[in-house]
Amino acid sequence: MIIRLSAGAAVGLALFAGPALAEPVKGAPELTHNALYKAAKLPKIACKLDKGTSGASTKKYVTTLVGCLNKAWQPAIKGFVPVKVVFKDADDKESCSTGMDVSGSFTEICATQLHVRLADDWIKAKSDVAVFTSVVRTWGGVVTGQTGIGQAWWALENDASETVMDEHNRRYYLQIACFSGVSAKALGRQVKDWKPILKVPEFWPNRFQGKTANRLYWMDKGYKAGKPGACNTWTASSSRVA
């Protein structure tokens, strides 16, 4: 998980600064008025997913799922580049985004590819909830990366207060949660219980994910709308991205 830290937080400065109030982002049109928000509802994709309990069947499942996501999002993103899947070696536990070792299965964006490490926790599982959730959540990084949102988020002032920077991070990751809902809708996924999907990976700092109620709000909003325009967290009130 990539996060942005304020310069003050990083070097222990700003001891005499007054309290800074976070607010909707201004002066960053790539975030607040991105062309993606005008895209139509994503097309429904007939995505036949069958996860067995072998390494080969799980790899096939992930590859099929990513192929379906490529088809679903291509019409919404100008100049869309299909994403390739790279399966990590079983003994390669390092996350490219955090540098940490992760013992179980995980997915993440490394440069322009979706990297996947498969371990027994996903391979042996009869349910596909964990792997589906991880891939779809990670896919949100593809959307932000190919629309300029990720770059614009990273370019936001890095000398702001920790309060403001934390809210920027939450706006970004809540938007990704919303995109997850959009993806699930496009693939025809029936979601009756969001709780398993709301679970945040242990190696992600929770304070950047927002409150459970807000994660649920944005994910459900994206799912019901089925289009990325529902996911503009950058103009939402601070309370909605707390």
Image (cartoon, rainbow, N blue to C red):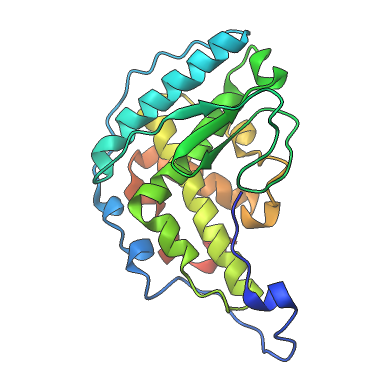
Whether residue 80 can be seen here: yes
Left or right of 17 in this view: 239: left
Q: Position of residue 194 (x, y in %)?
A: 58, 34
| Residue nearest the observer in this picture, 81 or 178 | 81
| Residue nearest the observer in this picture, 183 or 191 | 183
| Residue nearest the observer in this picture, 71 or 32 | 71
Q: Residue at x 66, y 84 (%)?
A: 19
Q: Position of residue 139 (x, y in %)?
A: 46, 38
Q: Is residue 16 above or below residue 3?
A: below
Q: Position of residue 134 (x, y in %)?
A: 57, 33
Quadrant where the C terminus sits is bottom right
The picture quadrant where one finds residue 26 is: bottom left
Whether residue 192 can be seen here: no
Q: Residue furthest bottom?
A: 16
Left or right of 120 in this view: 31: left
Q: Residue at x 47, y 28 (%)?
A: 85
Left or right of 76 in this view: 53: right
